[in-house]
Amino acid sequence: MKKALLSILRDKNTSRLHFRQAADQLASLIGAEAALDLQEKEYSLETPLGKARGYRIEENIILVPVLRSGLVLLHGFLKYFSDAKIGILGLKRDEKTAKANLYYKNIPDLKKTDHIFLLDPMIATGGTIKDSIKILKKEKIQEKNIHIFGIIASEEGIRSIKKEYPHVKIDVVGLDPKLNQAKYIVPGLGDFGDRYFGTI
Ligand code: URA
């Protein structure tokens, strides 16, 4: 199902309505997989009729979408992490240099043991993600507790992130071979935010 949804997103003839529907559905599936992957720890509880074995998630998950496309993934993750704290990072890449500028940062107080789900659908050069990781590490977050979720990444982007931050986890639906001169992922899907938000 994920590959079918990704194909709808890639197709240049997909309307805004169908792009949005497919992106929202894919975001829910990615969020569900992240939830299914979490360890559940045993504890004992009492039902109205007696003792029972219960399970709970011990990790404290903080959702950090990177504006603006990360908001699309946030919707999907909130279905399963409904009470998670949310930190927002606003990083906009300069279309000339493809470097990201931080224009907004609003992150809750973080503890060293917190787990961050960093949400960004398109990982091109990896620059935005690397800047985000740097910010999170400054807030005392451990690299191994940072999990990046995206829709498409370039091989170069993944290599670049892993080179600098070998312990972060990265999950994407599609991995593409190339970046063009403007640092867009090829074949990719074009500009995710423009297609989703309708700013083309
Ligand atoms: N952001 C996008 O939306 N698309 C790309 O190909 C790269 C970055």
Image: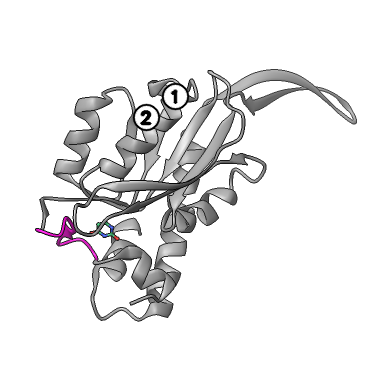
> In the image, 181: left or right of 189?
left
Kindly state the secondary structure of the residue where label 2 is placed: helix
Cα–Cα span, label 1 and label 2: 6 Å
Check disc 1 and give the amino acid type: Lys
Quadrant of the rendering where the N terminus is positioned = bottom left
The residue positioned 44% from the left and 24% from the top of the image is 138
Q: In the rendered image, is residue 38 in sight?
A: no
The residue positioned 17% from the left and 35% from the top of the image is 159
Check disc 2 and give the amino acid type: Lys
* Residue identifier under label 2: 134
Image height check: is 195 above or below 121? below
Instruction: Please give the label number shown on residue 138.
Output: 1
Q: Where is residue 11 in the image (x, y as percent from the top left)?
A: 24, 73
The residue positioned 43% from the left and 40% from the top of the image is 118
Picture quarter with ligand 1 = bottom left
Q: Is the magenta stretch mostly helix, strand or loop?
A: loop
Q: Give the quadrant of residue 133.
A: top left
Q: Give the range drawn in magenta.
A: 181-189
| Magenta stretch contains residue 182 | yes
Question: Mark 1: few, some, or many residues within 10 Å (few <14, many ≥20)?
Answer: few
Q: Where is residue 88 in the image (x, y as percent from the top left)?
A: 52, 45
